[in-house]
Amino acid sequence: MNPRSAFALLCTATIAVGLYSPSNTPTPESREGTHLSSSRSEAPWPPVATFSILGYDPETGELGGAVQSRVFSVGNGVLWAEANVGVVATQAVVDVSYGPQALELLRSGMAPGQVVETILRNDPNPRPERWAVQGRQFSVMDASGNVATHTGTQASDWAGHQMNQHVSAQGNILAGPEVVRNMVHAFESTDGQHLSFRLLAALEAGQDAGGDVRGMQSAAILIVKEDGGVWLNNDVVMRLQVDDSDQPIAELRRLVEIAGQQRARFRGR
């Protein structure tokens, strides 16, 4: 791993299997932008819901993601990113290795759709009874904003994703497809703002649409760009998380605003 890379990760629980939609390869799902799960599975553990978004700003070259979940410290499990390489969200019945695997494959020049196919094909499924490969949900975006997302057909209702140019929103145990649709719309309608505020607007829009049906507890955001962070040799533009709060998205906004003030001060030097 490049020592200047940035990463964080998310672990949540639902059951899912086998569909991905690369943004540059239209399928029935990707034309509509949303994959709807078609069945429900019983899990041997209490399911935990999550919604996340990945986004790229071609004007600044920044890319990153944001997430909210009804689980403690979601920032300890979902987002992986490396400047000039890409960003990954891994959630549901998560295999944490999907994050570094995806970055490594992107680094080798593989397209996001191929990354998704390769990781799923090579998953050894070591714990099929309680942590099955059929439970994976993840999204992979390269450094140019091309994206592919996998949502399982057995994910706990409602589960799915919506993609458009430079953006993908995905989640499970949500109020409905309007959650991811509103997230993508909010991201696109805030074009011109800093990427952090666009990702945050997407989380707020998803929550306003009903979000995680089990409520809120934690949220996180991660943005990278080569030399884009404060201080020297720092590719981390922003890495913030709220581990336990009744209003994690509102608290994340407070932190993002402080980070914006810090960024403005350093730009002035």
Image (cartoon, helix red, strand yellow):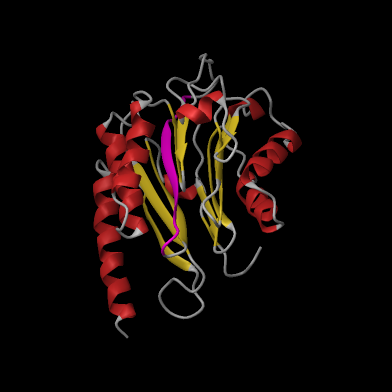
Q: Position of residue 244 (x, y in %)?
A: 33, 45
As for residue 55 lying within the magenta part, the answer is: yes
Residue drawn at x 42%, y 22% is: 158
Tell me: residue 93, above or below residue 106.
Answer: above
Which part of the image, by quadrant, shows the C terminus?
bottom left
- Residue ID at (35%, 44%): 218
Q: Is residue 143 magenta?
A: no
Where residue 233 appears, x then y in whole percent? 51, 78
Q: In the displayed structure, does residue 61 sit left or right of residue 218?
A: right
The magenta-colored residue range is 46-59
Residue 80 visible at all? yes
| Corner quadrant of residue 136 | top right
**Is 72 situated above or below 224?**
above
Q: Is residue 169 above or below residue 42?
A: below
- Indicate the position of residue 126 as horizontal and vertical percent values: 72, 32
Left or right of 140 in this view: 223: left
251 left or right of 33? left
Observer-nearest of 184 and 248: 184
